[in-house]
Every structure is written in structure tokens, then in C-alpha cells.
Image (cartoon, grey):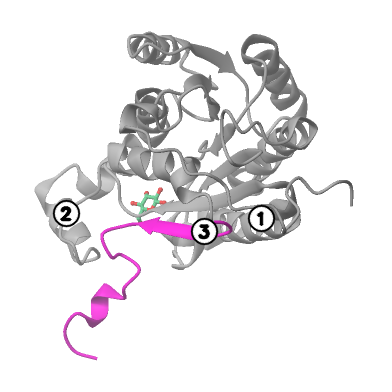
């Protein structure tokens, strides 16, 4: 192993006391899949916390540019970069462009993800590969580029106690099995152990790696589950807190987990799900 950044005899890191608008001041963040839904809310929340933000998108250039303008209004820098996260060459090109423009990266939010649902016997290899490619391989490719830069640069105490932060946006379905969505649940189960194994490996370099696991959040991906009153009532049976989550609630969790306030939080899956993982079927009976 090459040099450890912080030998154990060093004093504990000094926690900055800063207002929320400055929790990530001067940090450079990349959010994948950030032109809509949870990714967009995360990008906005990072900008509100003072970070400069790269919005990665794959298809919707207009939405990505619009998001950049909104973020710039917050007084920080923003840039949209197109890349399919499942493609190694495109991921490398995206990172080198980010490093050219922003100098470095402090926070990677591995958010890009999609669903291609089918009954198991109808699930095609193309659907399997697409979902694993974006949701799991994409997270690997982006995390690898980020870790390379974090290790190269090391800790910059003026910016953060940590050399860098990787946040994987996983799902309650990293632990809750999901029939009809086997490819998706497999991808998120994979993210869980990729995240934890990576966290174990890079911790000595002061690189923090964690996941956030959203439950049902109101975004286009799951409109079927909340778009009608009937569907919404069904959904509430799965949520002890009896409401759907909003994308900015994930944004706030990301800001905290990426900030030095969470400096000792490492290798965890933080569930933001209104209790969806609490076996809601057992609320009564059992
Ligand atoms: C899925 C949503 C679903 C939620 C809760 C998420 O990971 O993308 O479609 O509503 O999990 O089941």
C-alpha cells in the first residue's frame, strides 16, 4: 500500500462550523443522470450547499443546460457533460473534461439508473444487460475514475477532511426483493456490496464511500405507483410513514453525507424511505 494519508496518531479532524449554504463550499461535485428526477434534485441541493456541479446526462441536453442555468443562479459554477455511464471511453472523457474545467473532483454522486421491467420468463438479455450496465457497471466506472483522482490529490484540508467522497444512489431494493424487476434488484444488490467492498479498500486514504437508498420518491421512473389516487393508496400500504418521498429529501441527505459533518460515516447504506424497509405487512397481524 502506498502512503496512508492520515496515520492514526494524528489528531482528529477539525470540524468546520458552517451554515448550510456553505456545507460544501468550494467542492467540485459530479452527479450522474442529473437532468431529471432524483439526480436533478441532488445537483440543486449540492449547488445550494456551495458546490460547483457537473450535470451528467445521456439524452436530454436541453434539460441539462436548463439545470445548469438554475444552479449558476445560486452563485456557483455548473456544467453539463454528456456521457453514457456504462461506456468506459465516455466515462473517461467526461472525467477528463471535468478535471480540465474544474481542476479536480471532491464528490461523486453515482445516481444514473433506470428500470426495464418484465416478468422473469420474458426478461430479455438486452434488458438485463442494459440495467446492469447503467446501474452497476456505470457506478463502477465512475467510482474508479473518481478514486484515481482522490488518491492522486489526497486531502486538501481547506476543502474537506476527506480526500474525496463517493455516494452511490442505490435503492430499498438492495435489500427488498422485487418480483417483476429482477434485473433492477440484482443491480442494486450489486451496488451494495460494490460500495461496501470499495469502502473497506479505500478508507485508509480518507476516501469515504456510502450509499443512499431511496424508497418510493415522486419521480418519472415510478409514476405508475403514484400517478392515480388508486395507485397512490396501494403504494401507501408499503410506507409506514404514509406519504411518498420527494426528490429534494434525497438531495438533503446527499449534502449531509458528502459534507464533513458526516466525516466518520463510512460504508453505510442510508435508507431514506419512510420506513419501507420495516416489513409494513406486519403493521398489524403476524
Ligand atoms: C424504484 C421505484 C420504486 C421504489 C420503491 C425505487 O428504487 O426505482 O420505481 O417505487 O424503489 O419500490
Magenta residues, start to end: 266-286
Q: Which label belongs to residue 243? A: 2
Q: CA distance from mark 2 to mark 1?
A: 32 Å
Crowding at label 1, few (<14), some or many (≥20) Cα neighbours within 10 Å? Answer: many
Mark whose residue sits in front, 3 or 1: 1
Residue placed under numbered mark 3 in the picture: 185
31, 153: nearer the viewer: 153
Which residue is found at the position 40% from the left and 43% from the top? 256
Residue at disc 1, secondary structure: helix
Can you name the residue that lies furthest to the left here?
Answer: 229
Q: Left of 73 or right of it: where is 118?
A: right
State yes or no: residue 258 in magenta.
Answer: no
Can you name the residue that lies furthest to the bottom here?
Answer: 286
Q: CA distance from mark 3 to mark 2?
A: 23 Å
Crowding at label 3, few (<14), some or many (≥20) Cα neighbours within 10 Å? Answer: many
- Is ligand 1 closer than 8 angstroms to the Cβ of mark 3? no
Which residue is found at the position 48% from the left and 67% from the top? 175
State yes or no: residue 273 in magenta.
Answer: yes
Q: Left of 259 or right of it: where is 222?
A: left
Q: Earlier in the sequence, mark 2 or mark 1?
A: 1
Please tell me whether residue 230 is drawn above or below residue 80 in the rendered image: below
Residue at disc 2, secondary structure: loop
Residue placed under numbered mark 1 in the picture: 199
Image quadrant holding the C terminus, namely: bottom left
Say whether residue 134 is visible.
no
Q: Quadrant of residue 74?
A: top left
Which residue is found at the position 25% from the left and 65% from the top? 238
Mark whose residue sits in front, 3 or 2: 2
Which residue is found at the position 67% from the left and 40% from the top? 143
Amino acid at each position: 500500500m502506498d502512503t496512508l494519508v492520515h496515520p492514526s496518531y494524528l489528531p482528529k479532524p477539525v470540524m468546520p462550523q458552517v451554515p448550510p449554504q456553505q456545507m460544501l463550499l468550494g467542492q467540485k461535485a459530479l452527479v450522474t443522470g442529473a437532468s431529471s428526477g432524483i439526480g436533478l434534485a441532488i445537483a440543486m441541493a449540492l449547488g445550494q450547499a456551495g458546490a460547483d456541479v457537473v450535470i451528467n446526462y445521456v439524452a436530454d441536453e436541453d434539460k441539462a443546460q436548463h439545470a445548469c442555468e438554475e444552479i449558476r443562479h445560486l452563485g456557483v459554477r455548473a456544467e453539463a457533460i454528456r456521457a453514457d455511464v456504462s461506456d468506459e471511453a465516455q466515462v473517461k472523457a467526461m472525467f477528463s473534461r471535468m478535471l480540465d474545467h474544474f481542476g479536480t473532483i471532491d464528490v461523486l454522486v453515482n445516481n444514473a439508473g433506470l428500470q426495464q421491467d418484465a416478468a422473469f420468463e420474458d426478461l430479455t438479455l438486452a434488458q438485463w444487460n442494459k440495467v446492469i450496465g447503467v446501474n452497476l457497471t456505470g457506478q463502477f466506472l465512475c467510482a474508479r475514475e473518481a478514486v484515481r483522482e482522490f488518491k492522486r490529490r489526497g486531502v486538501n484540508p481547506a476543502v474537506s477532511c476527506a480526500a474525496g467522497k463517493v455516494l452511490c444512489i442505490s435503492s430499498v431494493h438492495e435489500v427488498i426483493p422485487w418480483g417483476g424487476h429482477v434485473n433492477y434488484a440484482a443491480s442494486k444488490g450489486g451496488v451494495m456490496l460494490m460500495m461496501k467492498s470499495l469502502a473497506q479498500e479505500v478508507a485508509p486514504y480518507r476516501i469515504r464511500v456510502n450509499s443512499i437508498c431511496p424508497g418510493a420518491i415522486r419521480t418519472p421512473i415510478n409514476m405508475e405507483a403514484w400517478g392515480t389516487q388508486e395507485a397512490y393508496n396501494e403504494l401507501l400500504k408499503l410506507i409506514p410513514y404514509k406519504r411518498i418521498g420527494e426528490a429534494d429529501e434525497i438531495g438533503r441527505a446527499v449534502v449531509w453525507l458528502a459534507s464533513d459533518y458526516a466525516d466518520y460515516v463510512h460504508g453505510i447504506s442510508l435508507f431514506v424511505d419512510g420506513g419501507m424497509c420495516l416489513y409494513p405487512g406486519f403493521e398489524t397481524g403476524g
